[in-house]
């Protein structure tokens, strides 16, 4: 009986980890699509002239999470670019955790 109970606990733990991970991925994608896609496109290629192509501008995605978080919070002006990303992509309601989720989403999706 003890072994069955331990297996059940392990199975529940695995289920919770996969469920939380899947929700985090969905949530981060929704945040990106709602706040970033307008300028960067759904595939990260840049929807407008002068906007960074996240699939080619990999140097941005190699920065540490704290460096990227600071840049997203303050806004980004790439040298020579004609377009400036406003702080938090123009959404002042985004939290640090939401911005971190977007960073992770961009790295997983566009940094290949």
Image (spheres, rainbow, N blue to C red):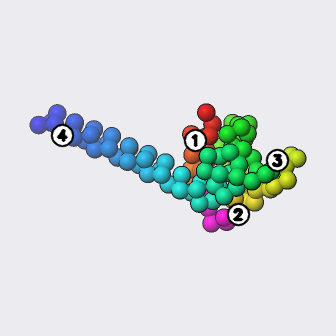
- Magenta residue span: 90-96
- In front of the other: label 1 or label 2? 1
Q: How far apart are marks 2 and 4 (CA)?
A: 50 Å
Q: How crowded is mark 3: few (under 14 residues within 10 Å), some or many (20 or more)?
A: some
Neighbour class for label 4 at 10 Å: few (<14), some, many (≥20)?
A: few
* Spatial separation of the CA atoms under disc 2 and disc 3: 16 Å
The secondary structure making up most of the magenta span is: loop
Mark sitting earlier along the chain (2/4)? 4
- Rounded to the nearest angstrom, the CA distance separating label 1 from label 2 is 22 Å
Residue visible at 58% across and 56% down?
33
Q: Mark 1 points at which residue?
A: 109
Q: Which of marks 2 and 3 is nearer the N terminus?
A: 3
| Figure check: 12 above or below 88 | above
Indicate the quadrant where residue 93 lies. bottom right
Front-lying residue, 44 or 1: 44
Cβ atoms at labels 2 and 4 below 8 Å apart: no
Residue mark closest to the camera, 3 vs 4? 3
Q: Name the residue under label 3.
A: 78
**Judging from the image, what secondary structure is the residue with disc 1 in?**
helix
Q: Name the residue under label 2.
A: 90
Query: Which residue shows up at 21% across the image and 40% down it?
Result: 8
User: Where's residue 25, x and y in %?
Assistant: 49, 48
Q: Tell me how far mark 4 sits from mark 1, CA to CA.
A: 38 Å
- Which residue is the site of mark 4? 5
């Amino acid at each position: 009986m003890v072994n069955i109970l331990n297996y059940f606990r392990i199975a529940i733990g695995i289920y919770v980890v996969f469920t939380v991970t899947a929700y985090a991925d969905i949530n981060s994608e929704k945040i990106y699509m709602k706040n970033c896609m307008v300028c960067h496109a759904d595939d990260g290629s840049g929807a407008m002239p002068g906007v960074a192509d996240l699939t080619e501008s990999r140097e941005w995605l190699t920065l540490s999470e704290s460096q990227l978080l600071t840049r997203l919070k303050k806004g980004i002006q790439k040298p020579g670019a004609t377009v400036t990303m406003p702080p938090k992509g123009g959404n002042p309601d985004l939290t640090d955790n939401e911005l971190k989720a977007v960073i992770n989403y961009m790295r997983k999706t566009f940094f290949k």
